[in-house]
Image (cartoon, grey):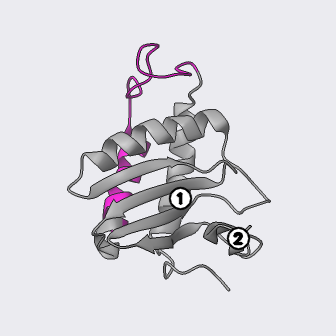
Amino acid sequence: MEKIQSFTIDHTKIVPGMYISRVDGDITTYDLRFCHPNREELDGAAMHTIEHLFATFIRNTSLDVLYFGPMGCLTGFYLLIRNADHTRVQKEIQMVLKNIIAFEGEIYGASKVECGNYRFHNLEGAKKAAEAFGRVMENPAALVYPI
């Protein structure tokens, strides 16, 4: 069986950053790698909170967002955008991270009615992770996986 494209990337060389994982027609899949693979991982509850907040904030931009969700390896997220302008996407991500860091109050979509695991959140952990990734995004990589 043929491997999927993301399994062909050498994960020992990936550092935190934003990468273009694939392009399918007018849809770009971004790999938002918050952590070094196989060396660190995001706290699951913080990751869940980032998912709720980031998805809400990014879908309220003018970007044509198709999907935002976590990686099973707990090292980052996938963001799918239609008709992506990479510079604009980077700027919107930076703004979303600032919004997460400044966020106070009830987490969007985190009630028993809205979420399948509504008690599994960590806002402070999400803010710390967003702050760390925000520093990475101040000087975003070339969007290309290391060889």
Q: Secondary structure at mark 1?
A: helix
- Quadrant where the C terminus lies? bottom right
Q: Is residue 67 left or right of residue 34?
A: left
Residue type indicated by callout 1: Phe
Q: Write down the quadrant of residue 63 in the picture.
A: bottom left
Measuring from the top left, give residue 15's x and y in whole percent. Answer: 66, 70
Outermost residue, left side: 62
Q: Residue at x 71, y 50 (%)?
A: 41
What residue is shown with label 2? Answer: 2
Circle 2 or circle 1, nearest the eye: 2
Q: Residue at x 49, y 72 (%)?
A: 22
Q: Residue at x 52, y 72 (%)?
A: 19
Q: Write down the quadrant of residue 113 in the picture.
A: top left
**How far is the residue under mark 2 from the one under mark 1?**
33 Å
Q: Which of the pair 6/33 is nearer the observer?
A: 6
Measuring from the top left, give residue 129's x and y in whole percent. Answer: 57, 48
How many residues crowd mark 2 within 10 Å: few (<14), some (14–19), many (20+)? few
Q: Which of the pair 29/120 is nearer the observer?
A: 29
Q: Is residue 130 left or right of residue 61?
A: right
